[in-house]
Image (cartoon, rainbow, N blue to C red):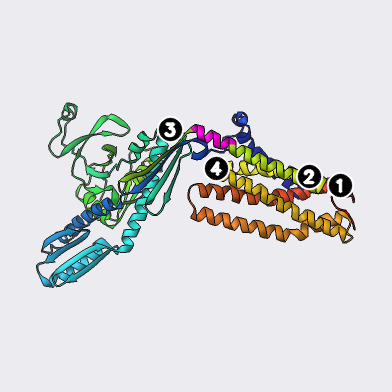
Amino acid sequence: MFKKLAIIFVAVFGVLLAVPTLTPSLAPYFPSWIQPIPLGLDLKGGAQLLLEVDTQTMFKEKATQLYDDVRSCLIDRSKGVIRFSGLRNNDGVVSLVVRNEDEVSKAKGRLRSELGTGVDISSDGKTITVSYTDKQKEEMVQDALTRSIEIVRRRIDALGTKEPSIQSQGGKYILVQLPGVSNPEHIKELIGQTAKMTFHLVNENVTAEQIASGRAPNGTAFLPLMDAPDQKIPVYTRVEVSGESLKDSQADFDQNNMPVVTTVFDTTGARKFAKLTTEHVNERFAIVLDDKVLSAPTIREPIPGGRGQISGGFTLQGAKDLAVLLRSGALPAPLQVIEERTVGAGLGADTIEAGKIASLAGLVFIIIFMIFCYREFGVIASFMLIINLAMIIGISALLGATLTLPGIAGIVLTLGMAVDANILPFERIRDEIREGATPLRAVDAGFHRSMKAVLDGNLTNLICSLILFQFGAGPIRGFAVTLSVGVITTLFTCVSLSKVVIDWYMNGKNKKISYVKNK
């Protein structure tokens, strides 16, 4: 009895999830986590942009950084200067000539120690060449793509755009779909900004009068504080550490249980950050993004391990926001818009109407077929199909899926597959009665013995839909989501729930099953 009540409860809950979608006027009366399913670009209308990560420009910047790192590494006075000449950068390959042949192995060892395993270091006589490995370049592209997606999403979210779809495509492309956006020009301008993040020292010698006058000394710039644009921070224009060297940042708590932001730099950034914090204790440094100062904390002590802690009277939310900005604030490479498409809202409305007609037509024909062939059991099966349809919509909305035209196709296909899940038990019941079983035993045996075939067919569809979701993109994923949800709801409604309702109909009695004719 408990099992049957649980099945009925799940069915009722699944149907309730679909009410805000099927009857939008009732949505305000439901909790915030039960909302109408959002419509995709092809149904609601909007804009679609295909962005390309400019890896060529990124590699040029990386090569320039490698050039500077090689130079700094060899002239490090704390470890002893290694004399060299002919330092040049040729298409990403940095080369130099060590003047003393006896120092070649020493120079290679220091470069390998400082630059890490992501570079190839080779020598030919006194000439040393340094370049990024192919594996490192692949990781750079993947990292640039991942970080760019995060930044694009954050910038679009800041505009209040509803249900944007942002995903990678083809290794170095980003597909952005913006339902309800008719003019994407402003968004294109926003997400195309590179927004380099940098770390600078603060010029403490600048007076308030100089800041008020707006006349900055040479090598200094007055940049506005992000949270208080009227307040200007005098920062040296020289970049001490590039934001590209930041590997991670997270909100945390210090020993006094106050919110702080922890930072982690890569090997190169850790070395530069250690030098900065060692030489400028009790001085301030500024974290600059988009020519605005995010924060200007004081260096309390040297930070040699590449892990820092930024404090400044943050609230927990403020620390989280700053961590996000540090972690994904700067695009690692420019983004180029290579394709743009706009879908009108009218076309979307026509598509929705066509989808409704197709779904309803399919449902009506299936119901007519089921009732004609299976009489009272067909009525029960038709009722299960309606519940199945509602549960697909409700669960998809709960999961945050976006309904697209291929998604509607997935729903229609699911309704067709659900017929099989009903026909197999019903035909098995027919066979059992013809073999002499009573109606009650025939119902039990029919559902039990057809279960394997029903599971095999639906699990095969589920595996295919999961593969489509994993390797597909855009509309293909929308189709896969509704198909996957539909397989699960079909197994629930057409097997478990249908059995409960039929048992209730039979009421423990051997009622005649009208669609079965004994021999």
Task: List the residue tagged with mark 1.
Answer: 507
Instruction: Quote the CA–CA distance across marks 1 and 4.
Output: 42 Å
| Disc on res. 371 | 2
Q: Amino acid at mark 4?
A: Leu
Instruction: Quote the CA–CA distance across marks 2 and 4.
Output: 29 Å
Who's the residue at 18% across and 41% down the image?
A: 237
Find numbered disc 1 in the image and state the secondary structure of the residue it sits on: loop
User: Quadrant location of residue 460?
Assistant: bottom right
Q: Amino acid at mark 1?
A: Asn
Residue 168 drawn above or below residue 351: below
Give how far across and how far down residue 119 sits, in percent.
27, 63
Q: Amino acid at mark 2?
A: Ile
Q: Count residues near mark 4 (Cα–Cα under 10 Å), then give few for <14, some for 14-19, many for 20+.
A: many
Which of marks 4 and 3 precedes in the sequence? 3
| Disc on res. 405 | 4
Who's the residue at 16% across and 26% down the image?
A: 213
Secondary structure mostly seen in magenta is: helix
Q: Are marks 2 and 4 in contact (CB under 8 Å)?
A: no
Which of marks 1 and 3 precedes in the sequence? 3
Give the mark toward the camera: 3 or 2.
2
Task: List the residue tagged with mark 3.
Answer: 182
What stretch of residues is rendered in magenta?
Answer: 345-353
Find numbered disc 3 in the image and state the secondary structure of the residue it sits on: loop
Which of marks 2 and 3 precedes in the sequence? 3
